[in-house]
Amino acid sequence: MCPDITRNLQQTGQLSRAWFHAADRPAPADLRTLDQHGITAALHRALRGPGISLRSPLPAGPLVLPRSSYDELFDLTRAMLGLCRRAVLALAPTWPARLEALGAQPEDHPLLSALDTTETEYCTLMASADFTVGPQGAPQLLRMHAAGDIRGVAETAAFTGVWQRAHRPGAFFGHDPVGRRARSVGEVCAARGLARSAAFLGGPRSGARPDAPYGEADAERMRGCGFTTDFVEPAELPDALGPPGAPRYSVVLDNGAATPAALRRGLLLPPAGSALLADPRTLALVSAGLPWLTRREERLVRRHLPWTRMTLPGRTRWRDEECELPDVLLRHQQQFVLRPGHPAGSRTLVGCHTAAGVWARAVDEAFTHGSGVVQEYVEPAAVTVELTDGEVLYPASVAPVLTAMLFAGRPGGCWARFTVADRGRAENAVLAWE
């Protein structure tokens, strides 16, 4: 290999390692006060709550970041969410018109209310962002989440509680997603003169949606924050919410299970308009450049948002080259990712992990419908984590997706998901050094 290339690879590896690791801190395992059997038992107790997934392999400790790296994830989420909000609001004067201008289908957003002011006021109340860390040590935004697809609240809270009990007191810091979410909802209730009562809407208790983050365990946590709260299944709607005009709950917290009838039975949070901020096509607008971006915002977008465009025919500019977008996707398959424009759409395809024939058909379909986005692929940096199967501890090199959560603009914890070679998928909470 060319010495210059080797030197560059070493330098970029050092940059990503510095982002993940604090050189002056011990290994988290050195601060552990429980053995692997105690940790496994504690995780099983914490993660068996309804609505929280229990996966194997299990982490043996938290993913701990330098405080500067941890804080950067929330700062970036807040900044990018603000740009997405401005991009959507600039599309048209009302939310139904904005939906149409973005190219979204009304049937995909049946809960969009006619209360434009309410939608605008609370569209950023709850949101999260998925990041991977690139080889240069810079977090790269993959996509936003809002409305009914925010996940990781219960998981992050459960893992964080275990890690803080299983290690020396005060070793790690992490924002509390349950408390921050309750505070944000409580502020809405106080501002509107509403009682502190909320209904959690989620999947059936018996396991049709075993990964649903909202459920009975979440309702119990909200009660601990001073709310009157119940878990409501889709089959119980709308009767469980009370009659129109006399709702049982001030707020309805949606996990994608609400019906249009629920809109008349309590304030829906997050509002349906949030989904337009999280639509990948909104990131494409921001990536392509908007006339009101400041130079600082343009630099932020270039550094932290991979090149993203809507799957619409026509010429575009990629890496200083004018090209037809469908052609460049076929010629440079390894460099791109295809994402559906709506969470319920087709699955995401990574070009370097997809057969050529499957990719070509997906590209044709994407440009036929024009509802998705293409994003430049970022090779994720790897980090070594310690895992357990309940009996032994072992290291694994993984490339985590880091999900930073915001509630009313405040940090609300960070969730990590990753794939372990030959062992399946796993998850964890992300903490920071105190």
Image (spheres, helix red, strand yellow):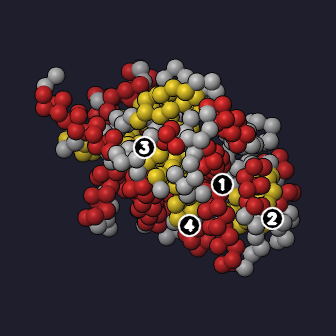
Q: Secondary structure at mark 2?
A: strand
Expressed as whole percent of the image width and height from the top left, the position of residue 54 reads 67, 35
Asked whether residue 94 is in view, the answer is: yes
- The residue located at (33%, 29%) in the rendering is 333
Name the mark on residue 228. Answer: 2
Q: Reading the chain from its start, which is encountered first: label 4 or label 3?
A: 3
Decide if residue 25 is on the left or right side of residue 292.
Answer: right
Type of the residue with mark 4: Ala
How many neighbours does mark 1 have within 10 angstroms: few (below 14), some (14-19), or many (20 or more)? few
Decide if residue 186 is on the left or right side of residue 429.
Answer: right
Q: Secondary structure at mark 1?
A: loop
Type of the residue with mark 3: Pro
Expressed as whole percent of the image width and height from the top left, the position of residue 24 reads 36, 48
Name the mark on residue 176. Answer: none
Expressed as whole percent of the image width and height from the top left, the position of residue 79 reads 41, 62
Q: Distance between the Cα atoms at labels 4 and 2?
A: 21 Å
Q: Nearer the viewer, residue 293 or 167?
A: 167
Q: Which residue is mark 1?
A: 110
Type of the residue with mark 1: Pro
- The residue located at (37%, 26%) in the rendering is 352
- The residue located at (47%, 34%) in the rendering is 385
Name the mark on residue 26. Answer: 3
Q: Which residue is mark 4?
A: 408
| Quarter occupied by residue 350 | top left
Q: Nearer the viewer, residue 350 or 12?
A: 12
Decide if residue 249 is on the left or right side of residue 351.
Answer: right
Q: Distance between the Cα atoms at labels 2 and 3?
A: 43 Å
